[in-house]
Image: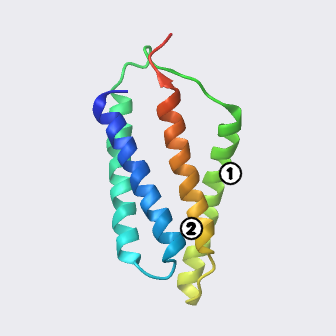
Amino acid sequence: MNFWHKRLVYFQVLLLLAVVTLQIFFPGVLYTAKVVMMFAFFFTEFAVLELQRSENPDAVYYRKSCVFALLDLLAVSAFILSGILWLIGICFEDNLLNPLYVAVILLYTAIRKLYIIKNYSYEI
């Protein structure tokens, strides 16, 4: 992981923690701030993926955990379910999502990114 790769991932973690904090303490307000931070997160994700793609794949050793693989599968399923519930809520003008549910998913994503930084090395 180079200097900018790590810095962008740390920036993403800070963005996610800020959104989680806003989601827990101000669940029904500050939508614009949450949306802006999530757009910044998604755009930096493109930069992180590009930096990861440009690295030498033979030099990278990433210790994978089957526990995190299962949690990643559950998190992706939760993201899909929350997106469906969000779209249904828009159609029927009803909020079907618990704000803590969204906060837990985003907090898991931040923890997962920190885990990747910790276990990403160039050892062979």
Mark 2: which amino acid? Gly
The image's mark for residue 74 is 1
Q: Residue at position x 35%, y 71% from top?
A: 33
Q: Residue at position x 33%, y 48% from top?
A: 44
Q: Is residue 6 above or below residue 124?
A: below
10 Å crowding of disc 2: few (<14), some (14-19), many (20+): few
x then y, percent, for residue 77: 65, 56
The image's mark for residue 85 is none
Q: CA distance from mark 2 to mark 1?
A: 14 Å
**Residue 48, quarter of the rendered image:** top left
Relative to the observer, which residue lies in front, 50 or 19? 19
Q: Earlier in the sequence, mark 2 or mark 1?
A: 1
47 sits left or right of 76 in the view = left
x then y, percent, for residue 34: 40, 69
Is any atom of residue 46 visible in this view? yes
Instruction: Kindly indicate whether the residue at mark 1 contacts the one at mark 2 (C-beta within 8 angstroms).
Output: no
Per the image, the residue denoted by label 2 is 83
Q: Residue at position x 40%, y 61% from top?
A: 38
Q: Is residue 14 above or below residue 103?
A: above
Q: How many marks?
A: 2
Q: Nearer the viewer, mark 2 or mark 1?
A: 1
Residue furthest out toward the bottom: 93
**Residue 7, quarter of the rendered image:** top left
x then y, percent, for residue 85: 62, 74
Q: What is the quadrant of the N terminus in the image?
A: top left
Q: Residue at position x 38%, y 54% from top?
A: 42
Q: Is residue 38 above or below residue 61?
A: below
Q: How is the image coloured?
A: rainbow
10 Å crowding of disc 1: few (<14), some (14-19), many (20+): few
9 sits left or right of 104 in the view = left
